[in-house]
Image: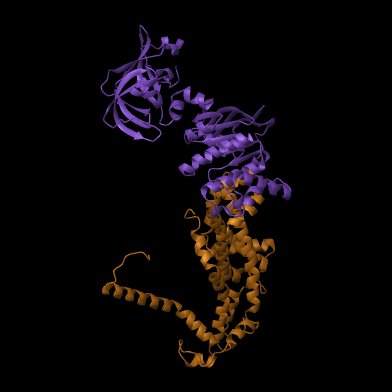
Amino acid sequence: MANMVRRHTTSARLWRAGLYTLLIVAALVYLLPLVVMLLTSLKPLDDIRAGGLLSLPSTISFEAWSKAWGAACTGMRCNGMSGYFLNSIAIVVPAVAISSFVGALNGYVLTKWRFRGANLCFALLLFGCFVPFQVVLMPMARTLGWLGLASSTSGLVLVHVVYGIAFTTLFFRNYYVSIPDEMIAAAKLDGAGFWRIFWRILLPVSGPIITVTVIWQFTQIWNDFLFGVSFAGFDSQPVTVALNNMVNTSTGVKEYNVDMAAAMIAALPTLVVYVLAGKYFVRGLTAGSVKG
Amino acid sequence: MSALNVRHVNKTFGSTQVLKDISLAIDSGEFLILVGPSGCGKSTLMNTIAGLEPVTSGEIRIGDEDVTWHTPSERDIAMVFQSYALYPSMNVRQNISFGLEMRKMPKAQREEAVSRVAELLQITPLLDRKPSQLSGGQRQRVAMGRALAREPQIYLFDEPLSNLDAKLRVEMRTEIKKLHQRLGTTIVYVTHDQIEAMTLADRIAVMRDGEILQLGTPHEVYNDPVDMFVAGFMGSPSMNFLPVTLVSQASGYALQVHDEKQGGTALTLPWPVERDTQELSSRVGDRLILGLRPEHFLEDDAIQETSGEGTRLEVTATVVEPTGADTLLQAWLGGNEITARLGPKSRVVAGDRVALRADLSRAVLFDEKTQRRLA
């Protein structure tokens, strides 16, 4: 764009100024809820009752944050979000790791060790991406019961792995399809077997798609509420469920500042992951589409 | 003893037969080239030799061993691919030693092999680079190095020079030939480039539609093609094919060249007496195809310097292409367009009437219908 010839006429400048104004306003509107949340979480309760949504706090206090983290009541217990936060981590980490690994393996087999019916297999897996959460609730509950995993962290991990494999397989399959088969043939001739090719040849070049998959799966599983509320036990509820319980508690005074702080705590990890790896996310999504 | 023996190999994909009863044997140290147009099955044949694709029936032997159902790694072969197929995450050193590592060669020996090969291919300064930091020619060398390090019984080259630019391709071609002469390796080499085939091969197998049409030395394939396809495929510019009728004259046989535009006979060429065969007598009066290579035409003045042999004919030049080393002339002979290779000194321009002589002593005759060689 820099080397484009453009004449700077007055009407062009006006047009441009209007365009930027519109964009800035749109950005502000988009940011507003976050601003309100942040401001509210930093205000004492009196400020919230007295002033408008957008008024600045009279004193900045992190009390709401510490209460949300350690002392707020969710249902019967008043230990804050911290325990549930750890529950979420205990669910997300193995679920992301397992579903990504299985997805990579599926993608590898579907592209480099093609078998009769591989395409049909892939089509059915793809179908899994379009199955709504609600549809699998009942059968999944029965299955977890049979497996003896009902109301447990491992049960939730299993649910997320099963549901995630469709997506992770899609990602890895489409990435590996662009890796030349000759490279695999060369490795076979060099004497490498199935696993050796996977570990030594394919995984080292999978960086971009691993990033995409991990971000995608992390966001999906961390933000999940429905599976969490349906299948989690009392001790294994994820942070999303805890947030809901806290905000919907009908006893006592409504502490908006604590609610806002808790909501932000619950949303923070996905934000952090996206900020740290978002660049690779976009890069990975387009990887393979252009021959490099 | 043959290093590689392919016996009655068939290969079908669904209902299409890609390889039809292929048999060939290669001696140790021989350079065999499989050449043919795309889709002729040459790459499939190579993949079956490599073990990357199973045969439908037939047998493949390497040395004394039947390897038909061995995996690629169990066959003592190495392969160089068209896309080089280097491992992008490994540097050159690791790329070359990967195969040795897989075969559990001790580290010290591996390093020795890498430096030997790197020196041979002059890639020592590149050993710590990644493939993405190399030029096409350098990648090609690394791919060859990977094969050479293993010292296998047989090397397979699958169109290794196709991705290089023209100048580099010629350089690498010479280098491959030098390497072969120096190391005495057994090589099977697939290409669609007939010049590569002619310049590199000890023997050439010309393939079409899953069959080997002719297997012979470059000289045999070029000068004694078995049919019109081989004759037309080998040589650039390709052989001229003229429709003729065989007639019997007092002095022997002669060929009446048809005028494809106006009908009738454009000219009559005497068939050299020493090239008479038994079969020709039964074909008098038949339509045949006369094959003359571009270099079988000589400019009339040029030929007078050496001898008065050949049949004189006059043509009208349509396109003149000086290449520097020689001049290619396209011209109308009767109603047929022919290509002649003239000397670099030729001053012919388009539109000229040019006097040529045709050297029929090296001409070939084909049956018009079966396209098989007659004489």
Residue A55 position (above or below residue A125): below
- Looking at this view, is A211 or B248 the one in front? B248
The quadrant of the image that shows the N terminus of chain B is top right
Up the image or down, A70 lies above or below B344; here it is below
Judge by depth and name the residue closer to the eye, B361 or B101.
B361
Specify the quadrant of the image occupied by residue B179. Answer: top right
Q: Nearer the viewer, residue B47 or B324?
A: B324
Q: Is residue B73 left or right of residue B137?
A: right
Which residue lies most toward the top here?
B250
Instruction: Quadrant for residue A204, please give it.
Output: bottom right
Residue at the spot 63% in from the left edge and 42% down from the top edge: B148
On screen, residue A70 above or below B368: below
The colour of chain B is purple
Please identify which colour was used for chain A in the image: orange
Tell me if residue B162 can be seen.
no
Q: Is residue B235 above or below residue A94?
A: above
Q: Position of residue A79 (x, y in %)?
A: 66, 82
Q: Residue A120, percent across and down? A: 54, 48
Q: Residue at x 25, y 22 (%)?
A: B262
Residue B366 x/y as whole percent: 42, 20
Write down the quadrant of residue A155 in the picture.
bottom right
* Colouring used for the render: by chain
Q: Nearer the viewer, residue A292 or B307?
A: B307
Q: Is residue B90 left or right of residue B170?
A: right
